[in-house]
Amino acid sequence: DVKVTQSSRYLVKRTGEKVFLECVQDMDHENMFWYRQDPGLGLRLIYFSYDVKMKEKGDIPEGYSVSREKKERFSLILESASTNQTSMYLCASSSGQARRGYTFGSGTRLTVV
Amino acid sequence: GENVEQHPSTLSVQEGDSAVIKCTYSDSASNYFPWYKQELGKRPQLIIDIRSNVGEKKDQRIAVTLNKTAKHFSLHITETQPEDSAVYFCAASMEAAGNKLTFGGGTRVLVKP
């Protein structure tokens, strides 16, 4: 019963490539989030969205952009991938009403070479 | 913005002993404090949460305490078992702000049989 799906589990991209990470949720959640996870740094918020076509910068938005054209889909875009963007990327969603915390996707481990 | 610090970064305990993880937060407006458990290679899962109108909450072998005055909260695991071995993250948010969570750096817990 997977509820938050990230399109790729592992990705290897070259420096300078444009990279798309896709996230889809089937819980009709209003809020969606992109975090990156690095050892010792926890989860750091890149961007989030609380409605279709709405987006807000998180704590580390530089080098990233997002798109939310439909409620269930939230895409993270690396405009020009760099080696310091090698990381685990986690998508999450939450309901604005229930306030029950996040449901996370399985993560995408991105390696930029 | 909010800043969450988590200690210790690693914790090794004997099976059957208790484990305590502590977090501090900076924004006095934060009012929601969840804890996530991430097993190796898996997504973070919500294990317990507490809101600022409550000082303590318990669920079987896990409990959370919150001290709003001191701006810190803790996770207590009693009678630890090998399956408690994981990385644990604390987080804080203001529920009105789109449920945006700020995470601590994580604690790697190892329960030795």
Image: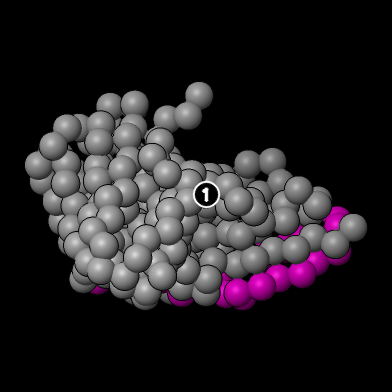
Range of magenta residues = B1-22
Report the front residue among B22 and A49. Answer: A49
B77, above or below B69, in the image:
above
Answer few, some or many: residues within 10 Å of disc 1's Cα (few below 14, many 20 plus, some between 14 and 19).
Answer: many
Which chain letter goes with mark 1? B
Rendering quarter of residue A23: top left
Residue B44 visible in the shown view: yes
Pick the residue in front: B75 or A78: A78
Vertical side of B56 occupied by A38: above or below: below
Residue at left 66%, top 73%?
B10
Residue at image location 53% in from the left, 71% down from the top: A39
Q: Secondary structure at mark 1?
A: loop
Q: Is residue A80 magenta?
A: no
User: Would residue A43 be found to the left or right of residue A54 on screen?
Assistant: right
- Residue A48 place in picture, x, y as percent: 23, 52
Q: Position of residue B2 (x, y in %)?
A: 30, 69
Decide if residue A47 is in sight here: no
Q: Position of residue B81 (x, y in %)?
A: 81, 51
Q: Residue at x 43, y 58 (%)?
A: A12
Q: Amino acid at mark 1?
A: Pro
In the rendered view of the protein, which quadrant contains the C terminus of chain B? Answer: bottom right
Q: Which residue is mark 1?
A: B44
- Which quadrant would residue A52 be assigned to in this image? top left
| Residue A94: x %, y % from top left | 33, 39
Q: Is residue B8 magenta?
A: yes
The quarter of the rendered structure image containing the N terminus of chain B is bottom left
Q: Is residue B9 left or right of residue A54?
A: right
